[in-house]
Image (spheres, helix red, strand yellow):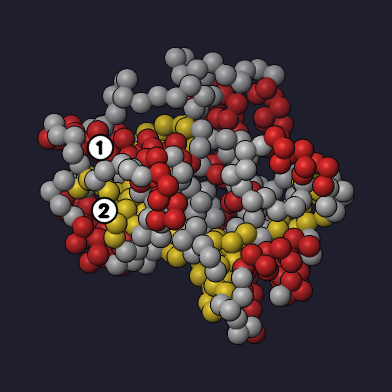
Amino acid sequence: MSSPYIEKAEAAILHTYNRYPVVFDHGEGVHLYDVDGKEYLDFGAGIAVQSLGYNHKAYTKALKDQIDKLTHISNLYYTVPMMEAAEKVVKASGMSRVFFTNSGTEAIEGALKVAKKYAYEQDGKADHEIIAMNHSFHGRSLGALSVTGNEHYQAPFKPLLPGVRFADFNDLESVKAQVTEKTCAVILETIQGEGGIYPATEEFLKGVKALCEERDILLILDEIQCGMGRTGYMFAWQEYGVMPDIMTCAKAIGCGVPVGAFVLGEKAARGSLKPGDHGTTYGGNPFVCAAVSKVFDLYEEEHILEHVLRVGDYLTGRLNELVQKYEFLKERRGKGMIQGLEVTGRPVGEIVNHALENGLVLMTAGNNVLRFVPPLVITEEDVDCMLEKLQKSF
């Protein structure tokens, strides 16, 4: 399948990914097309990135218009796209301040620095600890890897950031057991993604929030994959009514351009990073911020959240039907358009490969979960088409 392209890639690109044997050329709506012209229904969205689908005319026009003006000027100066994007992030979250990064991993790094600086401002000490969750995933840089609760990812790169303790997701007593006088932050995904699509329970999330408030510990919620409308709420924590002190986001915040952000509540913004504590050359440049600004506009104009609630319910129902039909499907987990099917007795990678052959793009989560994170603009008809291709792949 397009082997000359693949051979060239393998000869020049560092082999850190085991890529699927397909070379994509372009996309239109919720479909992708490879260099041979074959059409694929996309239920991966570039790992939950392409929420508006592909070749969205208003989105691409905003980027083209900005290219003609200015793509980069550094953070030594103000630009209108940065101001507009920041204002929209703050309004949508109800939080206080935003710092734009180049990726989700960088957003995590910034969040960790905020937590440590906040604690340092309180007591002048630099030995604070962070509680993270087992089976979590926050990124692959050394700081982000330090709070990723997966030994497989961590082992070759130790020693990592000291002072990280791990608790069990959705087990409040486990979190409480890890708290010490040095604890400065608790970090968790509102919905664990790579770990198998596990939503936080309301009791757990509210319990962690109460614990953090009681001990003046900062709560960091990682919304990099589950945020930006994927659950039918702009940010998944909004359904729970639990606002974090720090939120990280990326992926769909730019719908394809490399941009992330960490967003701070008033307490964290007021009591942590000062000029000189953090920076980035490319972060928040006018090109990516033009994308972010347009994404928020289009979510509102096209009623994306309402659409996700409706079609997400339909997707949930159809996936539940599959669990009833096939014995090797143990259960469905997730919310809205971040869903997982746990598979038993057969390798999920095999199913994903068959799906690709049948013109369906899917991904895995962990070792045994099929992950469904499609563009948020899919329809009920797209769900039905996906189900047909998936069952053929079974």
User: Which of the two discs, 2 and 1, labels the residue nearer the N terminus?
Assistant: 1
Rendered residue at 53%/35% (across/down): 259
Rendered residue at 51%/33% (across/down): 102
Q: Nearer the viewer, residue 78 or 38?
A: 38
Q: Is residue 233 visible?
A: no
Image quarter of residue 9: top right
**Which element type, helix, strand or loop, lies under badge 2?**
strand
Residue 117 place in picture, x, y as percent: 24, 33
Q: Amino acid at mark 2?
A: Arg
Image quarter of residue 269: top left
Q: Amino acid at mark 1?
A: Lys
Q: Are marks 2 and 1 in contact (CB under 8 Å)?
A: no
Q: How packed is label 2: few (under 14 Cα within 10 Å), some, or many (20 or more)?
A: many
Which residue carries the number 1 mark? Answer: 116
Q: Which mark is residue 290?
A: none
**Which element type, helix, strand or loop, lies under badge 1?**
helix
Q: Is residue 332 visible?
A: yes
Residue 332 place in picture, x, y as percent: 54, 73
Q: Which mark is residue 165?
A: 2
Residue 24 place in picture, x, y as percent: 77, 46
Q: CA distance from mark 2 to mark 1?
A: 15 Å
Residue 4 place in picture, x, y as percent: 83, 42
Rendered residue at 64%/64% (across/down): 349
Q: How packed is label 1: few (under 14 Cα within 10 Å), some, or many (20 or more)?
A: many
Rendered residue at 19%/34% (across/down): 126
